[in-house]
Structures are given as structure tokens and as C-alpha cells.
Amino acid sequence: MGGVGRGMPTSHYHRRHLARFGTIARGQPDLADAFFAYYGAVFQPAALSAREKSLAALAVAHVVQCPYCIDAYTRGSLEAGADLSQMTEAVHAASAVRGESVLAYGVQMSGQAGRLSMDGPTATVSQEYFDRNHSKERSSLAEPAPGLADAQRAWKEAVFTDGALASREKHLIALACAHAIQCPYQIEAHTLAAKKSGAELPELTEAAHVACAIRGGAALVHGIQMMEQIEEEETER
């Protein structure tokens, strides 16, 4: 089994990787050029401002757990005019989306547990848990732990109340996060909430593109680890 090369950093994440992001073009320059052109276009101010896009990117960076993107969009959000209060609220919106998504899927667990107790070990998750009206059943997960459910509901309501960020901005940030984690329940909920708070289709669409750009960028910037491993092997030959 191979070990860490002599020139390799001692952790999988190293800040020098972010500065080397452009070297991912070495293996496929045409693909890199196309991606970076798209990435640049996504973050041009349009229906959403540079500040709103940077905050959405920062939130998405947290739900996809990319330390490089968190570094980049902490700096990017500050440069675009956001402050710590706004950035913190954006991260809480990300956390609320991730948590709510877990609980939404938890209804499948509770439903399957009930079926297993009645039908034996061959019972499977019912198709009904994937239907659009599934949202009406989510309250059933609160029954075994009402105190936790009440506390979670109060936290979520606090997150999406107007604060350093307007409710509309928070729901757009949440919508981007929902796309990044591919949760249909949260996409539906925050599309409706964002529209109710005044967001228009161009803003919703740009939020989804921010999620796409960050999700793709997170994958590529982690490719610098691959590049450094290759470079290390080439040096040792």
C-alpha cells in the first residue's frame, strides 16, 4: 500500500490547492475553458446581485462541505459587500435546508419501521413517501419526539424570518442549497416560499445555477489533490 509522497501535504485539504485551481486544465484544457467560462458567467450580477450570489455560493459550499469553496466565498461575500451577520444567516439557511431534508426522508424510515413491525422483514418503503403529497405526512415524525420537533420548528422559523437578510434572500439561498443536495421536498418548499416573498423566475433560475457552479467547482478543485499525486509520481520516477 502506498503512503504519502515526500512532497505531498500531510492532510487531504491544503489551502495551496485553491491557488492552483487553474492547473486542473492540464488534463483537458478545452473542458476547463468551457467550465470556467460558465462559472464566470454565473457570478456576473444580473437578476441577483453579486452579493446575493456570493452568499448563496457560501451557503451551498457549506451543504456540499467544500472547504475550498468556503474559503473562496467567505472572502467573496465580504468583497461583494456582505457582513458577518448576513453570512451567518446564509449558513443557518443552509443548515436548515440540510436538516429539514433529513427529517423529510426520515418519514420514510418511520413508515418503513411501521410496515416492518406489521409485515415482517421483507417490507419495503411505500411509493407514497415519494409522492408530492408526502409533505402532509411529515408531521408524523414529530409524534415520537414532540419536544425535538417543536424546537426544530422554532429554529427554522427564526432562520427564515427577516433579519440581516430579507426572507426573500434567505429562501433563494435555501433554494440553491436544496438543488445542491438534490432534495425535491426542499426544492418545492423554497420555490413556493421564494415566489411568495416576491422572487421572480430569473432569480430562482440564477440561484439554481449558483448551486450548479459551486457543486461543479467543488468537484474540480478537489481534483488538485489528484494533480498533486500525479506530479509527485512523475517527480519520483
Image: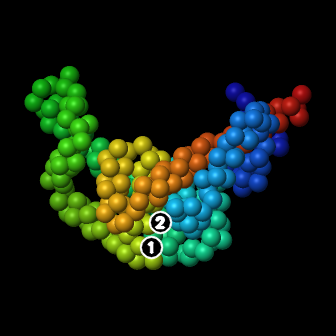
Q: What residue is pinned by disc 1?
A: 165
* Residue 132 position within the rendered picture, expressed as x and y whole percent measured from the top left: 24, 42
Decide if residue 76 is in sight here: yes
Q: Secondary structure at mark 2?
A: helix
Q: Is 162 on the left-hand or right-hand side of 207?
A: left
Q: Is 31 on the left-hand or right-hand side of 146?
A: right
As rendered, which of 195 and 107 lies closer to the eye? 195
What's the residue at 55%, 58% (across, down)?
A: 57
Marks 2/1 in contact by CB < 8 Å: the verdict is yes
The span from disc 2 to disc 1 (Cα, nearest Å) is: 8 Å
Viewer-nearest of discs 2 and 1: 1
What's the residue at 47%, 47% (across, down)?
A: 180
Mark 2 or 1, nearer chain start: 2
As rendered, which of 77 and 204 lies closer to the eye? 204
Q: What residue is pinned by disc 2?
A: 90
The quadrant in which residue 197 appears is bottom left
Question: Which class describes the residues within 10 Å of circle 1: few (<14), some (14-19), or many (20+)?
Answer: some
The quadrant in which residue 191 appears is bottom left
What's the residue at 45%, 77% (across, down)?
A: 164
Q: Secondary structure at mark 1?
A: loop
Inspect the image, locate mark 2, and give the three-letter code of the amino acid beneath it.
Ala
Say if 115 sits above or below 190 in the image: above
Quarter holding the C terminus?
top right
* Residue 227 position within the rendered picture, expressed as x and y whole percent measured from the top left: 76, 38
Quarter holding the N terminus?
top right
Say if 137 sits above or below 192 in the image: above
Inspect the image, locate mark 1, and give the three-letter code of the amino acid beneath it.
Leu
* Residue 24 position within the rendered picture, expressed as x and y whole percent measured from the top left: 75, 41
